[in-house]
Amino acid sequence: MSITVSNISKSYGKVTALTDISFDVKPGELFGLIGPDGAGKTTLFRILTTLLLADKGQAVVAGYDVLKKYKSIRNSVGYMPGRFSLYQDLTVEENLNFFATIFGTTIEENYDLIKDIYVQIEAFKTRRAGKLSGGMKQKLALSCALIHKPKVLFLDEPTTGVDPVSRKEFWEMLKRLQQKGITILVSTPYMDEAALCDRIALIQDGKILEIDTPKAIVNHFPKSLYNIRANDMYGLIESLTNYEHTYSIFPFGEFVHYTDKRESIDTESLKAYLVSQNLTDIYIEKTQPTIEDTFMELAK
Amino acid sequence: MKDKNVIQVEDLSKMFGDFAAVNSISFHVKAGEIFGFLGANGAGKTTAMKMLIGISSPTSGKATVAGFDVYKEAEFIKKNIGYMSQKFALYDDLTVKENITFFGGIYGLSKKQIDQKRCELVDELGLQEVTNSLVGSLPLGWKQKLAFSVSLLHDPKIVFLDEPTGGVDPITRRQFWEMIYKAAHNGTTIFVTTHYMDEAEYCDRVSIMVNGKIEALDTPKKLKEQYKTDTMNDVFLKLARG
């Protein structure tokens, strides 16, 4: 295993950040920690990168115990924190050189690994890091996290606040790194990115809700799910909230996602109810649940 | 009501030196509409929004917001709009009650009005037990819902929301949108930016900015038809890199 986490708990005073967390990440796996702000993702990253001590439990990263072999771990992992943590007043090239030197290597030695990413910012190599755009900072931070050829890469919310196009490009970069044999643990609040991981852990309030492949997690959704649309979204949500058979109802793009309390659902009577609520242009169809549906069901 | 334009923008530009951050954009937003203002990072959304809320003067072009001119009547604009963003919304080191009182005061409400609004708001959000807690101690989702309610304290005609749901859990994100629907239903115009493309689908109309220009503007349904895709995410991916 590249990462083994066993019964890790952590509190800050009265606030519990992590409760009895256990999971494994296999060598070469792209593993996602999926959960909103405040779920405990950053605390877990800081424990696994030896920057914070857990209250309870054990963790092994790249074959080393986080407590006893923390120095070996620091040489074997790359860590890109959620907040931009490079030196703002060093240039792009100086930052990269700095991190290479710290780890006893050179840019040239591992250039192959970062080439794809670094060429996109190389034109700005004399610019100070603090003056880069968000997307460029992200690429520089990733280059710096990779320059010592880590076995395991930790990426804490690398795409938060990033637009959909840049997010897509970032995930394509991750896939290429994975093909080079690097194990990746990545966290994200974007549920659509979960589908791009080999396996994911859904995490909320310091607890793991479920661990599996994205496909299996979606298959565990316990109910039949329906897309419903009508002329007036607000009216539709109100009406379904007051419907006696409603189990759950969430806006989902142009539809609402609806589940029913009953075993089998009679869409005609549901439609008749919505008509009686003065809604028109009613459309009901069965649909496939997404990771987000499953997350909301588990988090309820 | 819906036919009246509460935001009217014509050939609006903002230059930083030689760089056109906003390059001659034109659009209007109708009263009670939920208007999605999308674009990649660096496309010019924030610069455009700053001009519309009266804190940055345009280089050229015309714009009125809530009936007031962005050049000459910026102070009136500020009184007639609400604003919240992911980065700045409420003071973490004031309590829920103090934040409401503070913003109510800023918006010029009387003490009596503030007391009444506070009771309504605390009831509606179910915050009875935390009215005297520091806002910094609340979960992000609660904070964002509270911040949205606070931005509506003075019954503004328009509320500007800059990535209001970033990082918020999926259930709270939806509860937040239900609040948006309710406000729009009551006649408040909503001007919102987001990186969640499913939220783009919740908007009545959506504009997509690319390199300082508005490249597309229509209902989500028509945009999907025009770009021959099933999702707003694909529309965005097709457009946003120019």
Image (cartoon, rainbow, N blue to C red):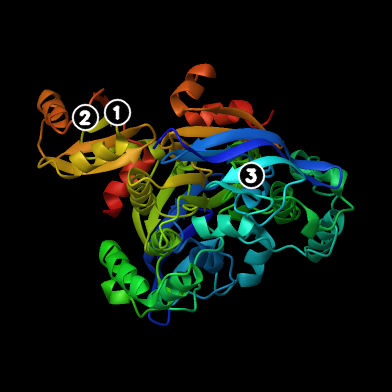
According to the picture, the residue beneath numbered tag 3 turns out to be: B45
Query: What amino acid does circle 1 point to?
Result: Asn
Mark 3 is surrounded, within 10 Å at the Cα level, by few (under 14), some (14 to 19) or many (20 or more) other residues, namely many
| First reached walking from the N terminus: tag 1 or tag 2 | 1
Q: Say what secondary structure mark 3 lies in.
A: helix
Q: Is residue B126 left or right of residue A24?
A: left
Check the residue under mark 2 and report the chain it is in.
Answer: A
Mark 1–mark 2 contact, CB under 8 Å? Answer: yes
Kindly state the secondary structure of the residue where label 2 is placed.
loop
- Percent position (x, y) of residue A210? 34, 51
- Residue for point 46% across, 45% down: B190
Amino acid type, callout 2: Leu
Q: How many marks?
A: 3
Circle 3 chain: B
Question: Which three-letter amino acid code belongs to the residue tagged 3?
Answer: Lys
Spatial separation of the CA atoms under disc 1 and disc 2:
6 Å
Q: Where does label 1 land, which residue?
A: A231
Callouts 1 and 2 in the same chain:
yes
Query: How far, Cα to Cα, is label 1 from label 3?
Result: 30 Å
Q: Which residue is mark 2?
A: A279
Seen in the image, is A297 located left or right of residue A126?
left
| Distance from the alpha carbon under mark 3 to that under mark 2 | 35 Å
Q: Position of residue B213 (x, y in %)?
A: 69, 33
